[in-house]
Amino acid sequence: MSDLSDDAALLAALSDDLDAGFAALVRAHQRVVYSVALRVGGVDAEDLAAECFLRAYRALRRYDRSRILALRPRAWLLTILLNTWRNTVRSATRHPATPVADVPEEAAGGASVEELVTAEETRRELGDALAGLPENQRVAVVLRHVVGLPVAEISAVMRVPESTVKSHVRRGLARLRETYAKEALA
């Protein structure tokens, strides 16, 4: 999670020198933006994250100092990302969706081949189950349990009340458990 004092320094840097401040913004938030892009959408995560940052830069060029200083950077970037993803999905109706990609993670020191294969299978199964959730539940679960955002920030990103976020997360997790339990029995 980003620290409020770090965000304040980042916003001050953005308002003082847009180019240098933007580079710091990207460094500070690129992992979370890419992670959400990878887990939420059925599109190329790198392209989606890059488009998000491009749109953010274009928007910042039009903002005055007071508007920049009032931003909540992570929530703002994730809102841009989700809007970009939705627009991409909407415009790609003629093309079939690409399945959620697996993220290769570095193996823990000394992990056996069997442990690595089992972990990869579990990650793929969970990724498939996550991809099968309705959009609002998938977004809420990813933002809450993958990215670790607080409910209030998810509420701002999704533009829904906090109670709705909690409901989406609860229902999404219930569906994931149900789907995973069915697959485990099969």
Image (spheres, rainbow, N blue to C red):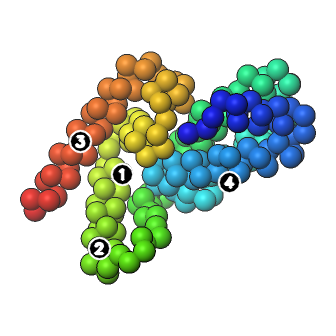
Where does the C terminus fall, quadrant-wise? bottom left
Labels 1, 2: front one: 2
Label 2 to label 4: alpha-carbon separation: 34 Å
Q: Which residue is mark 4?
A: 50
How far from the left and from the top, in percent, is residue 84?
A: 60, 43
Q: What amino acid type is highlighted by mark number 2?
A: Glu
Label 3 to label 2: alpha-carbon separation: 26 Å
Q: Which residue is mark 3?
A: 175
Tell me the number on the disc at residue 131: 1
Q: Earlier in the sequence, mark 2 or mark 4?
A: 4
Direction from residue 84 to residue 56 in the image, left or right: right
In this view, the residue in front, 152 or 53, is 152
In this view, the residue in front, 43 or 5, is 5
Count the marks: how many? 4
Asked if residue 33 is positioned above or below residue 124 in the image, the reply reads above
What residue is shown at x 15% (from left), y 52% (from top)? 181
Do the residues under discs 3 and 2 have CB atoms within 8 angstroms?
A: no
Q: Secondary structure at mark 3?
A: helix
